[in-house]
Amino acid sequence: MLFETFGRLKISEINPPMIEKFKQKRLEGETMYKRKRNPATVNRELCVLSKIFSLAFDAELIDSNPCRRVRKFRTDTRRTRYLTFEEEARLFEKLEGQEWVQRIVTMAINTGMRQGEIFDLTWFDVDLSRGLLHIRVSKNGKDRFVPINQTVRTMLERLPRISEYVFPSPKTEGRLVDVKFRFDKAKRDAGIKDFRFHDLRHTAATRMADGGADAFALAESSDGQTSEWLCVTLTRLLSRSVERLKIW
Protein backbone atom coordinates (compact mmCIF):
# COMPACT_ATOMS: atom_id res chain seq x y z
CA MET A 1 0.00 0.00 0.00
CA LEU A 2 2.88 2.39 0.73
CA PHE A 3 4.34 1.72 -2.70
CA GLU A 4 0.96 2.13 -4.41
CA THR A 5 0.50 5.53 -2.75
CA PHE A 6 4.00 6.99 -2.84
CA GLY A 7 5.94 4.74 -5.21
CA ARG A 8 5.83 7.12 -8.20
CA LEU A 9 6.95 10.16 -6.24
CA LYS A 10 10.43 11.27 -5.41
CA ILE A 11 11.04 10.98 -1.69
CA SER A 12 11.66 14.72 -1.51
CA GLU A 13 8.18 15.37 -2.99
CA ILE A 14 6.30 13.62 -0.18
CA ASN A 15 4.99 16.08 2.40
CA PRO A 16 2.96 15.92 5.65
CA PRO A 17 -0.45 16.65 4.02
CA MET A 18 0.07 13.68 1.67
CA ILE A 19 0.90 11.43 4.59
CA GLU A 20 -2.09 12.69 6.55
CA LYS A 21 -4.35 11.93 3.57
CA PHE A 22 -2.85 8.44 3.32
CA LYS A 23 -3.44 7.91 7.05
CA GLN A 24 -7.12 8.87 6.87
CA LYS A 25 -7.73 6.86 3.70
CA ARG A 26 -6.23 3.73 5.22
CA LEU A 27 -8.39 4.04 8.32
CA GLU A 28 -11.55 4.52 6.30
CA GLY A 29 -10.81 1.52 4.07
CA GLU A 30 -11.53 -2.14 4.73
CA THR A 31 -9.14 -5.02 5.29
CA MET A 32 -8.86 -7.93 2.88
CA TYR A 33 -11.40 -9.69 5.11
CA LYS A 34 -13.91 -6.84 4.61
CA ARG A 35 -13.53 -5.61 8.16
CA LYS A 36 -12.86 -2.21 9.63
CA ARG A 37 -9.13 -1.47 9.78
CA ASN A 38 -7.63 -1.06 13.24
CA PRO A 39 -5.99 2.35 13.92
CA ALA A 40 -3.01 0.46 15.37
CA THR A 41 -2.47 -1.15 11.96
CA VAL A 42 -2.32 2.26 10.29
CA ASN A 43 0.08 3.47 12.97
CA ARG A 44 2.43 0.57 12.20
CA GLU A 45 2.34 1.48 8.51
CA LEU A 46 3.26 5.05 9.43
CA CYS A 47 6.16 3.70 11.46
CA VAL A 48 7.46 1.85 8.40
CA LEU A 49 7.14 4.99 6.32
CA SER A 50 8.86 7.05 9.00
CA LYS A 51 11.75 4.60 9.07
CA ILE A 52 12.22 5.02 5.33
CA PHE A 53 12.39 8.79 5.75
CA SER A 54 14.82 8.42 8.66
CA LEU A 55 17.16 6.37 6.48
CA ALA A 56 16.87 8.95 3.70
CA PHE A 57 17.64 11.72 6.19
CA ASP A 58 20.72 9.86 7.46
CA ALA A 59 21.86 9.51 3.86
CA GLU A 60 21.35 13.28 3.41
CA LEU A 61 18.74 12.74 0.71
CA ILE A 62 16.14 14.89 2.49
CA ASP A 63 16.27 17.73 5.02
CA SER A 64 13.67 16.38 7.47
CA ASN A 65 11.28 13.53 8.17
CA PRO A 66 7.74 14.67 7.22
CA CYS A 67 6.20 11.83 9.28
CA ARG A 68 7.19 13.68 12.43
CA ARG A 69 4.57 16.29 11.63
CA VAL A 70 1.80 13.71 11.28
CA ARG A 71 0.19 12.49 14.47
CA LYS A 72 -0.56 8.84 14.90
CA PHE A 73 -4.01 7.67 15.92
CA ARG A 74 -4.61 7.34 19.62
CA THR A 75 -5.18 3.71 20.50
CA ASP A 76 -6.21 1.94 23.67
CA THR A 77 -3.68 -0.85 24.08
CA ARG A 78 -5.00 -1.98 27.44
CA ARG A 79 -6.30 -5.52 27.06
CA THR A 80 -6.94 -8.08 29.75
CA ARG A 81 -8.62 -10.64 27.51
CA TYR A 82 -7.67 -14.25 27.94
CA LEU A 83 -9.23 -17.56 26.97
CA THR A 84 -11.25 -19.38 29.62
CA PHE A 85 -11.06 -23.17 29.81
CA GLU A 86 -14.65 -23.38 28.63
CA GLU A 87 -13.89 -21.16 25.62
CA GLU A 88 -10.80 -23.23 24.89
CA ALA A 89 -12.89 -26.40 24.75
CA ARG A 90 -15.35 -24.76 22.33
CA LEU A 91 -12.53 -23.44 20.17
CA PHE A 92 -10.86 -26.84 19.87
CA GLU A 93 -14.20 -28.41 19.07
CA LYS A 94 -14.58 -26.04 16.10
CA LEU A 95 -10.99 -26.77 15.03
CA GLU A 96 -11.70 -30.50 14.84
CA GLY A 97 -10.16 -31.92 11.68
CA GLN A 98 -7.55 -29.14 11.56
CA GLU A 99 -4.92 -30.67 13.78
CA TRP A 100 -2.14 -28.39 12.52
CA VAL A 101 -4.06 -25.32 13.74
CA GLN A 102 -4.89 -27.04 17.03
CA ARG A 103 -1.19 -27.69 17.58
CA ILE A 104 -0.28 -24.05 17.03
CA VAL A 105 -2.96 -22.87 19.45
CA THR A 106 -1.79 -25.46 21.98
CA MET A 107 1.76 -24.17 21.60
CA ALA A 108 0.69 -20.56 22.15
CA ILE A 109 -1.43 -21.34 25.21
CA ASN A 110 1.26 -23.43 26.88
CA THR A 111 4.37 -21.39 26.08
CA GLY A 112 3.23 -17.80 25.54
CA MET A 113 5.18 -17.69 22.27
CA ARG A 114 4.20 -15.18 19.62
CA GLN A 115 2.62 -16.40 16.39
CA GLY A 116 5.70 -15.54 14.33
CA GLU A 117 7.97 -17.28 16.83
CA ILE A 118 5.91 -20.44 16.52
CA PHE A 119 6.04 -20.26 12.72
CA ASP A 120 9.83 -19.70 12.80
CA LEU A 121 10.55 -22.56 15.22
CA THR A 122 12.76 -25.28 13.71
CA TRP A 123 13.61 -28.71 15.05
CA PHE A 124 17.20 -27.53 15.45
CA ASP A 125 15.95 -25.15 18.17
CA VAL A 126 14.02 -27.82 20.09
CA ASP A 127 15.94 -29.32 23.01
CA LEU A 128 13.70 -31.98 24.54
CA SER A 129 16.46 -33.28 26.80
CA ARG A 130 16.61 -29.92 28.60
CA GLY A 131 12.95 -29.06 28.02
CA LEU A 132 13.75 -25.79 26.24
CA LEU A 133 12.93 -24.02 22.98
CA HIS A 134 15.44 -21.57 21.53
CA ILE A 135 13.75 -18.42 20.21
CA ARG A 136 16.20 -16.70 17.90
CA VAL A 137 16.04 -12.91 17.84
CA SER A 138 12.68 -12.28 19.44
CA LYS A 139 10.69 -9.06 19.14
CA ASN A 140 12.99 -7.25 21.57
CA GLY A 141 16.01 -8.14 19.42
CA LYS A 142 17.45 -10.80 21.71
CA ASP A 143 17.52 -14.58 21.77
CA ARG A 144 15.70 -16.29 24.62
CA PHE A 145 14.85 -19.78 25.85
CA VAL A 146 11.30 -20.90 26.56
CA PRO A 147 10.66 -23.84 28.91
CA ILE A 148 8.07 -26.42 27.88
CA ASN A 149 5.52 -28.28 29.99
CA GLN A 150 4.42 -31.88 29.64
CA THR A 151 1.61 -30.98 27.24
CA VAL A 152 4.03 -29.40 24.77
CA ARG A 153 6.64 -32.12 25.26
CA THR A 154 4.14 -34.88 24.47
CA MET A 155 2.89 -33.02 21.41
CA LEU A 156 6.41 -32.43 20.06
CA GLU A 157 7.45 -36.03 20.65
CA ARG A 158 4.51 -37.23 18.56
CA LEU A 159 4.95 -34.77 15.69
CA PRO A 160 6.35 -36.14 12.41
CA ARG A 161 9.53 -34.38 11.31
CA ILE A 162 8.58 -33.76 7.68
CA SER A 163 10.28 -30.37 7.48
CA GLU A 164 12.95 -28.30 9.17
CA TYR A 165 10.06 -26.34 10.67
CA VAL A 166 8.20 -27.76 13.65
CA PHE A 167 4.87 -26.41 12.37
CA PRO A 168 5.25 -26.30 8.58
CA SER A 169 2.66 -25.27 6.03
CA PRO A 170 0.45 -28.30 5.25
CA LYS A 171 0.65 -27.34 1.57
CA THR A 172 4.32 -26.49 1.00
CA GLU A 173 6.00 -28.02 4.07
CA GLY A 174 7.89 -24.72 4.26
CA ARG A 175 7.43 -21.90 6.76
CA LEU A 176 3.82 -21.31 7.68
CA VAL A 177 2.58 -17.83 6.81
CA ASP A 178 -0.72 -17.40 8.61
CA VAL A 179 -3.55 -19.16 10.45
CA LYS A 180 -5.78 -16.09 10.76
CA PHE A 181 -8.58 -17.28 8.45
CA ARG A 182 -9.01 -20.68 10.13
CA PHE A 183 -8.45 -19.35 13.65
CA ASP A 184 -10.95 -16.51 13.21
CA LYS A 185 -13.56 -18.80 11.65
CA ALA A 186 -13.29 -21.31 14.50
CA LYS A 187 -13.45 -18.46 16.98
CA ARG A 188 -16.64 -17.08 15.43
CA ASP A 189 -18.23 -20.53 15.18
CA ALA A 190 -17.42 -21.09 18.86
CA GLY A 191 -19.05 -17.78 19.82
CA ILE A 192 -15.83 -16.33 21.22
CA LYS A 193 -15.87 -12.54 20.96
CA ASP A 194 -13.26 -9.82 21.35
CA PHE A 195 -10.35 -12.24 21.12
CA ARG A 196 -7.18 -12.17 19.01
CA PHE A 197 -4.51 -14.79 18.48
CA HIS A 198 -2.12 -12.56 20.41
CA ASP A 199 -4.39 -12.87 23.44
CA LEU A 200 -3.25 -16.49 23.72
CA ARG A 201 -0.06 -14.99 25.19
CA HIS A 202 -2.19 -13.34 27.87
CA THR A 203 -3.87 -16.69 28.42
CA ALA A 204 -0.50 -18.43 28.86
CA ALA A 205 0.83 -15.87 31.35
CA THR A 206 -2.44 -15.76 33.29
CA ARG A 207 -2.44 -19.53 33.70
CA MET A 208 1.24 -19.50 34.66
CA ALA A 209 0.45 -16.91 37.32
CA ASP A 210 -2.55 -18.85 38.60
CA GLY A 211 -0.37 -21.94 38.71
CA GLY A 212 2.08 -20.23 41.04
CA ALA A 213 4.77 -19.22 38.55
CA ASP A 214 7.56 -17.04 39.91
CA ALA A 215 7.01 -13.34 39.16
CA PHE A 216 10.47 -12.86 37.73
CA ALA A 217 10.17 -15.95 35.56
CA LEU A 218 6.87 -14.60 34.25
CA ALA A 219 8.49 -11.26 33.45
CA GLU A 220 11.21 -13.10 31.53
CA SER A 221 8.70 -15.15 29.57
CA SER A 222 6.85 -11.96 28.61
CA ASP A 223 9.97 -10.96 26.65
CA GLY A 224 10.14 -7.37 27.81
CA GLN A 225 6.49 -6.42 27.37
CA THR A 226 5.43 -3.42 29.43
CA SER A 227 1.67 -3.55 29.01
CA GLU A 228 -0.64 -2.48 31.79
CA TRP A 229 -2.00 -6.02 31.85
CA LEU A 230 1.45 -7.43 32.54
CA CYS A 231 2.10 -4.88 35.26
CA VAL A 232 -1.15 -5.84 36.99
CA THR A 233 -0.32 -9.54 36.71
CA LEU A 234 3.17 -9.06 38.13
CA THR A 235 1.85 -6.89 40.95
CA ARG A 236 -0.61 -9.61 41.88
CA LEU A 237 2.16 -12.20 41.88
CA LEU A 238 4.52 -10.06 43.93
CA SER A 239 1.75 -9.34 46.45
CA ARG A 240 1.18 -13.07 46.75
CA SER A 241 4.89 -13.58 47.35
CA VAL A 242 4.89 -10.91 50.08
CA GLU A 243 1.96 -12.62 51.80
CA ARG A 244 3.90 -15.90 51.78
CA LEU A 245 6.85 -14.13 53.42
CA LYS A 246 4.53 -12.83 56.14
CA ILE A 247 3.34 -16.36 56.82
CA TRP A 248 6.91 -17.65 57.04
Image: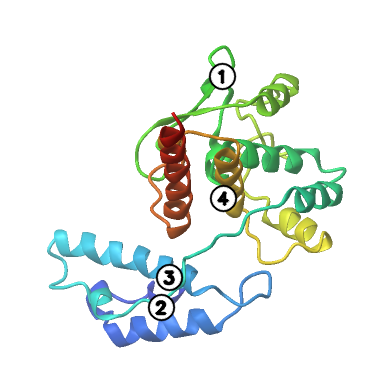
Q: Say which residue label 3 marks.
A: 2
> Which one is in front in this view, the residue at disc 3 or the one at disc 1?
1
User: What is the crowding at mark 3: few (fewer than 14 residues within 10 Å), some, or many (at least 20)?
Assistant: few
User: What is the crowding at mark 2: few (fewer than 14 residues within 10 Å), some, or many (at least 20)?
Assistant: some
Callout 3 secondary element:
helix
- Residue for point 30% across, 67% down: 50
Q: Earlier in the sequence, mark 2 or mark 4?
A: 2
Callout 2 secondary element:
loop
Callout 1 secondary element:
loop
Q: Say which residue label 1 marks.
A: 131
> Which one is in front in this view, the residue at disc 4 or the one at disc 3?
4
Q: Amino acid at mark 4?
A: His
Near-viewer residue (109 or 65): 109
Q: Say which residue label 2 marks.
A: 73
Q: Earlier in the sequence, mark 3 or mark 1?
A: 3
Q: Say which residue label 4 marks.
A: 202
Q: x and y percent of residue 10 in the render?
A: 27, 74
In the rendered picture of this protein, how many numbered marks are placed on residues?
Answer: 4
Q: Amino acid at mark 3?
A: Leu
- Residue for point 37% across, 75% down: 8
